[in-house]
Image (cartoon, grey):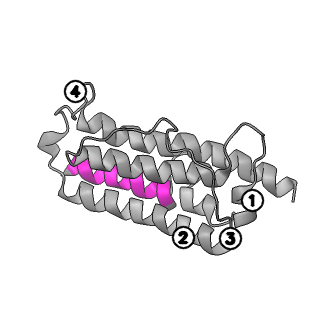
Amino acid sequence: MKETKRIIKLFEDLYEGSPWIDVTIMGTLENITAEQAAKRVLAKHNSIWEIVNHLVMWRLTVLQRMQGTVVVFPDNNYFEPVKDTSESAWKTTLEKFNDSQQKWIDFLKTFSENDFEKLVQNKTMTYYEHIHGIIQHDAYHLGQITLLAKITTKNN
C-alpha cells in the first residue's frame, strides 16, 4: 500500500496540492473564466476548454480500461468543439474534472499493488505505466493550459 499512497499523493498534488512543478490543475483552472477557456488563441489549435474536456475524457477512459472495459478511442482523440460557452457550462466542466479526480482516488484506494506489473488489455503496458501515464498526460496539458491562460489574460 506504500506505493499506492505515493501515487495518490502525486494525483492529489498535481490536482490541487504542492507538486514539484509548483503549478496545479485546479489552481490554474479556477482563475480562468468561461470566456478565456473558450477562446481559440491559435486558429488550428485547441482552446483551454477543449483541452480540459480532453483531459476529463482521457482520465475516465483510462480508468475504464484499468477496470477491465475494452475501450475504442475516437478518431478525434476527445477533442471536440465546445457548444455552450456560458459560465455555468464552464462550472459544469470543472465539476466533471473534479468528479474524474475523485473516481481516480477512489479506484487507487482499492487497487492491489500486486496488480501494478500486470499488463492492461492492450498487452503492451502495465497498470503501473497507465497510472503514471495519466499523471504525465495531465501535467503535459497543464503546461499548455497555463500558457494559454497567460496569453488570454494579456489579450483581455
The residue to which callout 4 is attached is 123
Looking at the image, which residue sits at the far top?
A: 124
Q: Is residue 8 magenta?
A: yes
User: Residue 19: x percent and y percent?
Assistant: 50, 51
In this rendered view, identify the residue nearer to me: 87 or 131. 87
The residue to which callout 3 is attached is 86
Mark 1 vs mark 3: give the one in front: 3
User: Residue 154: x percent and y percent?
Assistant: 86, 54
Left or right: where does residue 152 sit relative to residue 134?
right
In this rendered view, identify the residue nearer to me: 106 or 64. 64
Residue at left 56%, top 62%? 26
The residue to which callout 1 is attached is 36
Mark 3 vs mark 4: give the one in front: 3
Q: CA distance from mark 2 to mark 4?
A: 35 Å
Label 3: few (<14), some or many (≥20) within 10 Å? few
Which comes before the other along the chain, label 1 or label 3? 1
Label 4: few (<14), some or many (≥20) within 10 Å? few
- For residue 92, the mark is 2
Kindly check if marks 2 and 4 are in contact, taking CB atoms under 8 A apart as contact: no
Q: Which residues are magenta?
A: 2-15
- State the quadrant of the C terminus: bottom right
Q: CA distance from mark 2 to mark 3?
A: 10 Å
Which comes before the other along the chain, label 4 or label 1? 1
Which comes before the other along the chain, label 2 or label 1? 1
Residue at left 78%, top 40%? 42
Which comes before the other along the chain, label 3 or label 4? 3
Q: CA distance from mark 1 to mark 3?
A: 11 Å
In this rendered view, identify the residue nearer to me: 150 or 45. 45
The amino acid type of the residue labelled 1 equals: Gln
